[in-house]
Image (cartoon, rainbow, N blue to C red):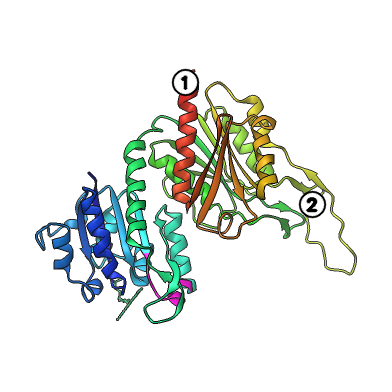
Amino acid sequence: MARILLGVTGSIAAYKACELLRRLVSAGHDVVPLVTPGAARFVTPETFAALARRPAGESPYPHLEHADLLVVAPCSANTLAQLAHGLADTVLTEAALAHRGPTLVAPAMNSRMWTHPATRANVELLRGRGVELIGPEEGELAEGEWGPGRMSEPELVAARCEELLGPHEAAAGSLRGRRVLVTAGGTREPLDAVRFIGNRSSGRMGVALAVEAAHRGAEVTLLAANLATPPPAGLEVVDTPTAADLARELLARADGAHLVVMAAAVADYRASEPREDKRPKDEEPWRITLEPTLDVARELGERRRNGQVLVAFGADQGEPGLARKRAMLDSKGVDLVVYNDVGRTDIGFDSPDNEVTLITRAGERTVARAPKGAIAGAVLDEAERLAGSRRGS
Ligand SMILES: Cc1cc2nc3c(=O)[nH]c(=O)nc-3n(C[C@H](O)[C@H](O)[C@H](O)COP(=O)(O)O)c2cc1C
């Protein structure tokens, strides 16, 4: 049984929190409802206290109680902003500041509020801190408009709570004493003083992996290539803007690492002679010769020591891409290839979600579309399994 803090905020979707609470309680969890004054306009705190099987107003300090999970569902735009900026003027936001552990947020709001740049920035801040968001879904909103903003259905939120609690409880400390190196983001190869060749990787997948490894007790170093999301607090972060920087830092640290997860999108080519100055604009074509960068995954595969597990992400398209990624097991000498289909627009580079195929020498399995935090859990589960079978063999 886990202890869950359930935050409910002033959204028309507050009624969905009743069903979520009912499901969590039926699953045997100890749930402490934290109802904002805004939410109390929609559903009374007494209703939540009754569903949680607790006397109303039981503890004056619910926010200081230890909890295994904080879930905020529905989360209004206002509370989302407060969480992002560390404000604490409701029982819920106080609890969020005191909470140390996984946090799941299910936003619900009008789609114009959801797409406002202020909300987008707040979402990025939260994600960067390792907070996981579920939804919102697209659909008809309470005002009769259509768009993203509906809170995810309670059964989906409850299922995600179980996943976050299950692996966490099982995996808590499972990487204690292990050193994990994670690469994240996309490298930029200079063409001149201001221009570069880059890619669309935001770094969210790598950051999610680093956060998950740290939750599991690992000593994590994140090699960060131009992250579009703030790096997580509490980890060693080394800036590696170019493929050469990333290769240098990775090779310098790899010998001491038990697990290396290469999630960064590293340039395969760079300009052979980047200009030091800014090339002035003129009418002439600009011919650039590209040369291959060091294949750092292969380099690591060749020099790895016993017991080290190497994981490489591979972005490609469709079935032919999958076949090319299968070949990476041998061509690069890695243990696990995580295949990302970049032909799809609903997952991958700019999306909070991902869907991947995990390829090992023993076989393949697809991890269904899920937030990147959940995908990170599946990747690390597989990496730990490989490490365990290595030790066993
Ligand atoms: C009928 C009604 C429905 C509302 N629904 C939402 C909503 O779905 N999402 C949201 O962000 N705000 C919604 N609001 C506005 C919030 O209730 C308001 O911003 C409030 O200050 C939120 O406080 P809280 O975040 O502390 O609960 C709604 C307001 C009203 C009157």
Where in the figure is residue 277, as x and y percent of width and height? Answer: 78, 58
Q: Nearer the viewer, residue 53 or 241?
A: 53
Mark 1 → mark 2, Cα distance in angstroms: 46 Å
Where in the figure is residue 99, as x and y percent of width and height? Answer: 28, 52
Q: Nearer the viewer, residue 326 or 273?
A: 326
Marks 1 and 2, the one that precedes in the sequence: 2
Asked if the beta carbon under badge 1 is closer than 8 A to the nearest atom of ligand 1, the reply is no
Q: Which residues are magenta?
A: 107-115
Residue 214 in the figure: left or right of residue 60: right
All told, the count of numbered labels is 2
Where in the figure is residue 158, as x and y percent of width and height? Answer: 32, 55
Asked whether 108 falls inside the magenta stretch, the response is: yes
Q: Which mark is residue 274?
A: 2
Q: Nearer the viewer, residue 374 or 19?
A: 19
Q: Which residue is mark 1?
A: 391
Q: Furthest residue to the right? A: 284
Q: Quadrant of ligand 1?
A: bottom left
- Can residue 235 be seen in the rendering of this structure? no
Q: Residue drawn at (63%, 53%), measured in percent from left and top?
A: 342
Q: Nearer the viewer, mark 1 or mark 2?
A: 1
Identified by mark 1, the residue type is Arg
Q: Furthest residue to the top? A: 393
